[in-house]
Image (spheres, rainbow, N blue to C red):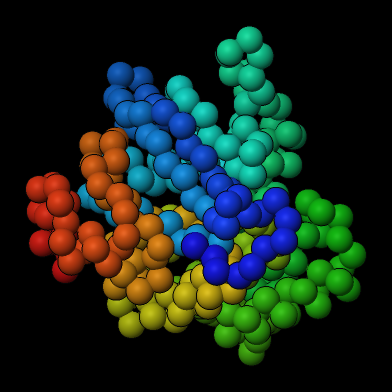
């Protein structure tokens, strides 16, 4: 949780406001029940880490937060805005694509795979969304993009194409690209899982720096050290439910549920 003093509605009784609120979320793929009534909150400035075995629903939940996946039941709010839907008479009606795109402007997402435009340089990749989506002038977008590339340690790679960059460098460009839209929330879906082990550290350091700056983050990861060091909440999911949630250091050192114990015994 952010410890920076707030003077506006960002604080409620001394605590940062709830930026993300997930209420009773279910997700079906046909008859496959992937999410089974998830409740979760993330406060402004907080780093929330999700862990669990493959197929536990954590990446699906993350993708539901910015409506890359629709939900089958429940509600997801970001900054008190219902994501992906309009509610009328107790029923949800999916928003038009344009309105969903507007909501996503405030939510940055970094995927396992970097999804950079191969025919554009690192600089052009970071400039793309502010120019095309926000209508920002190219000169201002370029200045901001150069600042962000410097922030992720890649100012000397601005004119390199993705094929000329390592996987770790591409992922750091992807983080800079997400930050270029000035999001209030950053989602990370196993951002280091596709990287060679020696490239993981640089990406995690960028994420640590982001956390230290007060960015609200929800991170799906297998990097238990990151969860212990940077996370403020840790949620263990299995079988589409939240099994255990709380202080990362306490859960990692002394998991209460046998499923959490079994999982951590394999990854620590």
Residue 240 as seen in the image, left or right of residue 158: left
| Picture coordinates of residue 200, whole percent (x, y) | 37, 76
Residue 16 visible in the current orientation = no
**Does residue 59 appear in the picture of this structure?**
yes
Q: Is residue 207 above or below residue 25?
A: below
Give the percent coordinates (x, y) of residue 173: 58, 72
Q: Position of residue 91 (x, y in %)?
A: 58, 13
Determine whether 229 is above or below 20 in the image: below
In the picture as drawn, the residue positioned furthest to the top comes out as: 89
> In the image shown, does 147 or 8 lie closer to the viewer?
8
Q: Would you identify the image quadrant in which residue 247 lies?
A: bottom left
Residue visible at 58% across and 65% down in the picture: 215
Q: Position of residue 121 (x, y in %)?
A: 67, 73
The residue drawn where x is 72% and y is 80% is 147
The answer to whether 122 appears left or right of 192 in the picture is: right
Residue shown at 38%/57% (left/top)?
233
Q: Residue at x 63, y 26 (%)?
A: 85
Q: What is the residue that sits farthest to the front in this orientation?
A: 13
In the rendered image, the quadrant that contains the C terminus is bottom left
Q: Is residue 225 left or right of residue 74?
A: left
- Residue 37, by quadrant, is top left
Q: Looking at this view, is 63 or 118 the one in front?
A: 63
């Amino acid at each position: 949780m952010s410890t920076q003093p707030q003077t506006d509605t960002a604080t409620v009784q001394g605590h940062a406001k709830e930026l993300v609120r997930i209420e009773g979320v279910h997700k079906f793929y046909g008859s496959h029940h992937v999410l089974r009534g998830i409740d979760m909150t993330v406060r402004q400035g907080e780093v929330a880490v999700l862990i669990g075995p493959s197929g536990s629903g954590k990446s699906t939940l993350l993708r539901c937060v910015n409506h890359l996946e629709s939900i089958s039941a429940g509600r997801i709010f970001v900054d008190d805005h219902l994501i992906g839907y309009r509610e009328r008479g107790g029923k949800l009606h999916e928003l038009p694509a344009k309105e969903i795109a507007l909501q996503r402007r405030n939510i940055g997402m970094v995927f396992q795979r970097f999804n950079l435009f191969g025919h554009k340089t690192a600089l052009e990749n970071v400039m793309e969304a502010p120019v095309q989506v926000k209508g920002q002038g190219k000169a201002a977008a370029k200045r901001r993009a150069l600042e962000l590339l410097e922030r992720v340690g890649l100012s000397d790679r601005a004119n390199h194409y993705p094929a000329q960059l390592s996987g770790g460098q591409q992922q750091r460009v992807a983080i800079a690209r997400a930050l270029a839209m000035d999001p209030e929330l950053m989602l990370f879906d196993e951002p280091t899982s596709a990287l060679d082990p020696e490239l993981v550290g640089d990406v995690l350091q960028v994420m640590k720096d982001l956390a230290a700056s007060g960015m609200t983050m929800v991170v799906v990861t297998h990097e238990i050290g990151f969860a212990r060091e940077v996370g403020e909440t840790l949620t263990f999911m299995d079988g589409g439910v939240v099994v255990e949630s709380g202080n990362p250091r306490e859960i990692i050192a002394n998991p209460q549920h046998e499923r959490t114990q079994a999982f951590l015994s394999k990854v620590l």
